[in-house]
Image (tube, rainbow, N blue to C red):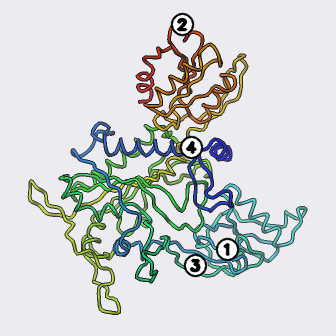
Amino acid sequence: MDKIVSLCKRRGFLFQSSEIYGGVQGFWDYGPLGVELKRNLKDAWWSDMISAHNELIVPANAPSEFEMVGLDCTIIMHPQVWKCSGHYDLFHDHMVDCRESKKRYRFDQVRGRWCSHGEKKIFVTTMAEAELELDEVRRRAMKFFKLRPKNADELSVGNESLTLDQIQERDQVLAPDAKSLDTLTEPREFNLMFKTTLGALGGEEDAAFLRPETAQGIFVNFKNVVDTSRVKIPFGIGQVGKSFRNEITPRNFTFRSREFEQMEIEFFCHPEQSKQWYQYWRDRRMNWYTSMGLSSESLIMREHHQEELAHYSIGTADIEYAFPFLPAGEYGELEGIAHRGDFDLRSHMEGKLDPNSPEGQPMQVELNENGKPKHKGSGKDLSYRDPVTNERFVPHVIEPSAGADRAALAFICEAYSEDKVADDKGDLQERTVMKLNPRLAPIKAAIFPLVKKDGMPEIAKEMYSELKKHMNVYYDDKGAVGKRYRRQDEVGTPYCITVDTDTLSDNTVTIRDRDSLEQVRVKIDDLVGELNQRLR
């Protein structure tokens, strides 16, 4: 993982936000290559899921034909949206503060082990990565008990790694950055939405929130889309956009960030078909990741246990990837596919629902101090009338929700490879290569003149200008051709095109494949068609 992070910084995929001022934790900037990769990823998702979905339905087990349309909703919405969705009341993590270090931690992420010396037993915690946890716990325990390395055998460290919420004896806890025991406060709720202010006055009535997900913009526009697009159920609405969550402890490179981009679909269907559509979207989304280059051996589909489900969820499954920063055998979430029932549309019609009531039944209305409904819905009719059967119902929703940043990170991790290839003299040389799917590769082709004379640069630059109209290409005439190949391999460019002495006589160039290293001759006039075919 250290090599991947280094490459991302060195070659312009990702930078720490505001780095010259020390950076801001949980925020990342995409560099020249990173922005191309992420844009290609979002374009591929949009094409395969929305604009060209009829051509690319894989697997071919859809319960029926369906339509897909798109939206682009605002980041700031009416505050009541977040009341009715449940985010205002339920979207939080539990946190603890350390009275000694003045630092704040997410309650469920502070891990540690019981350590004993003589009759004294303490629970030593750390925020170190999982593979370093045991060593860090041992080091901190040795320091706490004032043990020298030669007395290490006097320390007993528990075999089981536990989180704070599994520990009852809080007065025996050594906080991650503390030197004394019992410095952590009781856990308390911390809302993850970023608060902001609308208008110039800045009173409490002007408070608003940056959206923590893109989904709610789709739900509140459901009726608008049905009325204007003439779509019929079943149909899906897709959206790509920024979301914001005030994570207490952002970590693992871009995996857990405070500003991130989502690629979400809300698929509306008849309640009687919802389980079939749920299975369909599970299969289709898993197949999409493997078709784009993620190894099936590094992916799993994990069904949520009953106690994990969100209060509105009928069923949820996560597509998870074996990121290299995780311990062997562990996976991190790439995408969630949720069967949300009719919770969202009903909530925005009637107000927040009681998760313990029978499905579709509104809660007893909770009143505020003025005797008015506390969680008031829009009062708009968001049901759907079937134009053929005249049946009216509130659609069920299947939600495939993917993170563009996590997906980009997964494809970068999967693509990173090291091997050996022969240089210009035939000697084997180490090379770093990013084996990105050509659809995702930031640069599609690089053009090299073999030497900077005999008219080769002029031909190469003319080719560059022509290809630039069709795809992102790169021109390079510096250094030996072998070194130029290595530079392009390192950023994932699938094809390198060389203008050489034969070009001057027969108007052909060499195309070199990044992965197979195969080289073929192609006429310059056929180059655009050849590359487009290969890139598809």
Residue 159 position (above or below residue 434): below
Mark sitting on residue 505 = 2
Reading the image, the residue beneath label 3 is: 187
Relative to 374, 190 lies left or right? right
- Is residue 24 or residue 1 the one in the foreground? 24
Reading the image, the residue beneath label 1 is: 103
Q: Earlier in the sequence, mark 4 or mark 3?
A: 4
Residue 384 position (above or below residue 199): above
Relative to 62, 45 lies left or right? right
Rounded to the nearest angstrom, the CA distance separating label 4 from label 3 is: 42 Å
Q: Hey, what amino acid is under mark 4? A: Pro
Secondary structure at numbered mark 2: helix
Reading the image, the residue beneath label 4 is: 32
The furthest residue to the top:
505
Rounded to the nearest angstrom, the CA distance separating label 1 from label 3 is: 13 Å
Mark 4 vs mark 3: give the one in front.
4
Q: Position of residue 186 (x, y in %)?
A: 60, 81
Q: Earlier in the sequence, mark 1 or mark 3?
A: 1
Residue 500 position (above or below residue 13): above
